[in-house]
Amino acid sequence: MRPADYYLKTDDRSSDWAGRASEQGFAPVASVIEAASPFISSGKRVLDIGCQGGHQLALLRDRFDEAHGLDIAPYTNMWSHFSDINFLVHDVDAEQIPFPDAHFDTIIATNVLEHVFDVFGFVSEVSRLLKKGGTCVLSVPNVAEIRRVASVIRGRVPVTGGDQYPFTPEQGWDGQHLHYFTPSAVSELLASHDLKIAETLIIGRFPKIKRVWLSGLSSSIDIVAIRV
């Protein structure tokens, strides 16, 4: 099966939030966008890679002259609610993202990097597309979280994307996550492509406690990086 064919099952991918898709201000990762918002300046263009229904992009739409979202599969019904956003169906592993160098002020890539085949190629594209001084909002699951480390010690797979364990054919192996990341690995990966972490976001409950030991207590790695 081609990746595009799997991801065409958009109903399955959005089943846990599709019922809220038409709510004003709703977004599956609204907490990340809200936390990153103070670090995102207004500009000409914003791109959301792996935009799904376009909801997180809509939260930032008013800050930019143009808003673009792309996904490997069409979310036609949801996209129809956002007439002022330009949507594109595109497989980032198959070919270069069709925009010129240094075209965007901000790029959003939440819960995408763990799905692509070529991690280095993807980050290279983000670096190419961002203007110098531009902002990238990136989120990936954190495999170093203590509960996931405990799973490995017990001889189990560290669940980062699956809804249940053991995994099932319907949800795919760990939600079709192909790669695993730690905070230090993400920092090194971004730095090798001229992306410097400007802020590590604390998402969810108990932020003060999480900040003490973020790599072990946070289930995700949520950062704002600057193109240098």
Image: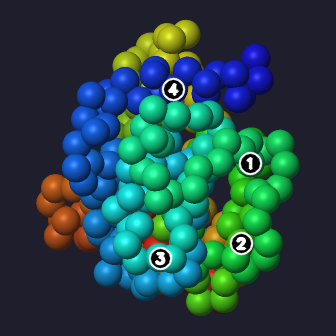
Percent across and percent down for residue 151 are 41, 31
Q: Are marks 4 and 1 in contact (CB under 8 Å)?
A: no
Identity, as a three-letter code, of the amino acid under mark 4: Thr
Q: List the residue tagged with mark 2.
A: 129
Amino acid type, mark 1: Val
Closer to us: 209 or 126: 126
The image shows residue 2 at horizontal and vertical percentages of: 77, 23
Dot 4 corresponds to which residue? 10
State which mark lies toward you, 1 or 3: 3
Q: Residues within 10 Å of mark 2 (few under 14, many from 20)?
A: many
Q: Is residue 201 left or right of residue 42?
A: left
Residue with the mark numbered 1? 92
Q: In the image, what residue occupies the spot 42% across and 51% down?
A: 82
Other-residue count near label 4 (Cα within 10 Å), few / some / many at <14 / 14–19 / ≥20? some
Pointers 2 and 1 in contact (CB under 8 A)? no
CA separation in Å, label 3 and label 4: 27 Å
Percent x, y of residue 212:
26, 70
Crowding at dot 3, Cα within 10 Å, few <14 / some 14-19 / many 20+, comes out as: some
| Dot 2 or dot 4, earlier in sequence | 4
Mark 3 and 4 residues: CB-CB less than 8 Å, in contact? Answer: no
Question: At 71% across and 44% down in the image, what residue appears?
Answer: 90
Q: Residue at x 59, y 50 (%)?
A: 87
Q: Amino acid at mark 3?
A: Phe
